[in-house]
C-alpha cells in the first residue's frame, strides 16, 4: 500500500470514529436529558448538582472537540495544534473533576470528617500537580509531540499527531494516579465493611446508597486505569484500526460514565419506597430513620 493509500485509509478511519463519537455522545445526552431536567433543573441545587453540570457539559464539549479534530472538518496546522492541546489539557481537567466527585462522596461516607478530608486533599494536590507536569512534558513540548497537515488530494486534508518520545514517561506518570485511585477504593471498601457490620448488629438492611457509591468507586477505578493504559499505548506505533478503536473508547467512555453514575443515584432515590422521596436526595433524612419505615437513604451525599 502506497503512502497516499495509507493516508486515505487513516482518514477514512478517523472520520468513521469521529461520527461514532458524535453519535454516542449525542445519544447519551438525549437519553439522559429527561432525567437531567427532573433531577437537576427541577430541584434545588447542591454541590453535586454543580459537579454534575460541569462533568456533563464540559465532557460533551471535550468529546465533540475530539470528534472534530483530525479530518472530519478541515483545520490548518496551527489551529490543529492548539485544539490538540485543548483536548489533552481538557481530559486531564475532566479526570481531576471526576476525582473531586469521588472525594466528596467519601468525605460524606466518613461523616464529613475534616481529618479525612485533609488526607484526601493532601494526596490529591500532588495528583493535580502531576497532571499538570504530565501535560506539559507529554503534550505541550514540540520536542515531544507535533501535529501536521497531511494532504490526500488537492482539496482533502487531515491533521495527525506525531510522537517523538516513547510511551515510558506516560506509563511512569500514570502510576501515582492509579495508586491514588486504589487508595480511594480501599477507603470506600473499608467504610462499606464497617457499615455492613453495624447494620448486621442492629438487624437493619444495608444502606442502598453506601453500596452504590462504593460500586461507583470501583467502576471509576477500572475506567480510569483503562484510560491511563490506553493513553500510554497510544504512544506506541499502533496499527490504524487499533489506534482508532482505542481513541473511540478514550474519547467516549469517561464522558458517558461519570455523569451517568451521578444521575443513577438520583434516579434510584426517586424510585425508592422512602417516605421522604418527595424531598431532594440531598435533604432526605432516611439515613437516620428507624427501620420500620424501610429507610435506607443517606442525606447530603448527592
Image (tube, grey):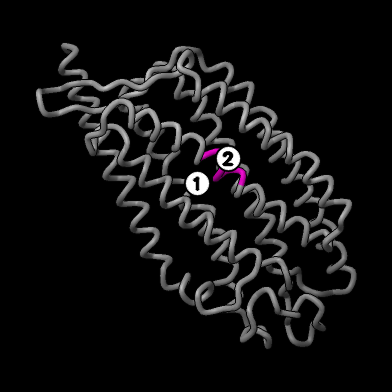
Q: In this view, does 60 lie to the left or right of 150?
A: right
| Residue lying at 42% horizontally and 52% vertically, measured from the top left | 60
Q: Which residue lies furthest to the front in this view?
A: 78
Q: Which of 300 and 286 is in front in this view?
A: 300
Q: Residue at x 59, y 63 (%)?
A: 50
Say which of 97 and 259 sits in front: 97
Question: Does the magenta portion include 220?
Answer: no
Rounded to the nearest angstrom, the CA distance separating label 2 from label 1 is 8 Å
Residue 227 in picture, x, y percent from top left:
52, 36
Q: Position of residue 45 (x, y in %)?
A: 60, 72
Disc 2 and disc 1 in contact, CB within 8 angstroms: yes
Q: In this view, does 153 lie above or below 107?
A: above
Q: Mark 2 points at which residue?
A: 224
Question: Is residue 146 positioned above or below 111 on the image?
Answer: above
**Badge 1 element:** helix
Q: Is 55 positioned to the left or the right of 100 in the image?
A: left
How many marks overall?
A: 2
Q: Residue at x 33, y 27 (%)?
A: 78
Tell me the element at label 2.
helix
Residue 18, numbered circle:
none
Q: Viewer-proximal residue, 234 or 218?
A: 234
The residue range painted magenta reads 91-96
Please give left or right for residue 174 compared with residue 1 in the image: right
Which secondary structure type mostly characterizes the magenta part of the structure? helix
x and y, in percent, of residue 144 in the image: 48, 16
Say above or below: 302 vs 161: below
Mark number, residue 254: 1
Quadrant of the image occupied by residue 75: top left
In which quadrant will I find the C terminus? bottom right
The residue drawn where x is 26% and y is 22% is 149
Mark 2: few/some/many CA within 10 Å (<14, 14-19, 20+): many
Amino acid at each position: 500500500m502506497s503512502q497516499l493509500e495509507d493516508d486515505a485509509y487513516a482518514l477514512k478511519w478517523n472520520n468513521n470514529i469521529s461520527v461514532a463519537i458524535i453519535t454516542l455522545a449525542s445519544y447519551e445526552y438525549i437519553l439522559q436529558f429527561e432525567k437531567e431536567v427532573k433531577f437537576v433543573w427541577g430541584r434545588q441545587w447542591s454541590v453535586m448538582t454543580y459537579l454534575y453540570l460541569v462533568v456533563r457539559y464540559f465532557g460533551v464539549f471535550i468529546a465533540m472537540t475530539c470528534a472534530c479534530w483530525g479530518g472530519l472538518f478541515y483545520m490548518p496546522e496551527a489551529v490543529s495544534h492548539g485544539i490538540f492541546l485543548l483536548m489533552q489539557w481538557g481530559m486531564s481537567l475532566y479526570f481531576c473533576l471526576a476525582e473531586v466527585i469521588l472525594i466528596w462522596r467519601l468525605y460524606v461516607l466518613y461523616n464529613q470528617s475534616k481529618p479525612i478530608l485533609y488526607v484526601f486533599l493532601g494526596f490529591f494536590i500532588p495528583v493535580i500537580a502531576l497532571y499538570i507536569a504530565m501535560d506539559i512534558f507529554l503534550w505541550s513540548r514540540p520536542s515531544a509531540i507535533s501535529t501536521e497537515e497531511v494532504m490526500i488530494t488537492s482539496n482533502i486534508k487531515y491533521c495527525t499527531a506525531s510522537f517523538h518520545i516513547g510511551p515510558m514517561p506516560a506509563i511512569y506518570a500514570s502510576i501515582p494516579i492509579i495508586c491514588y485511585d486504589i487508595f480511594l477504593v480501599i477507603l470506600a471498601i473499608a467504610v462499606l465493611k464497617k457499615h455492613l457490620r453495624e447494620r448486621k448488629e442492629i438487624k437493619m438492611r444495608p444502606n442502598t446508597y453506601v453500596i452504590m457509591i462504593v460500586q461507583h468507586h470501583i467502576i471509576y477505578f477500572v475506567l480510569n486505569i483503562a484510560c491511563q493504559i490506553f493513553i500510554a499505548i497510544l504512544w506506541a506505533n499502533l496499527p490504524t484500526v487499533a489506534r482508532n478503536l482505542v481513541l473511540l473508547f478514550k474519547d467516549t467512555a469517561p464522558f458517558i460514565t461519570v455523569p451517568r453514575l451521578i444521575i443513577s443515584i438520583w434516579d434510584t432515590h426517586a424510585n425508592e419506597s422512602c417516605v421522604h422521596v418527595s424531598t431532594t436526595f440531598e435533604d432526605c433524612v432516611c439515613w437516620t430513620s428507624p427501620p420500620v419505615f424501610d429507610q435506607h437513604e443517606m442525606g447530603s451525599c448527592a
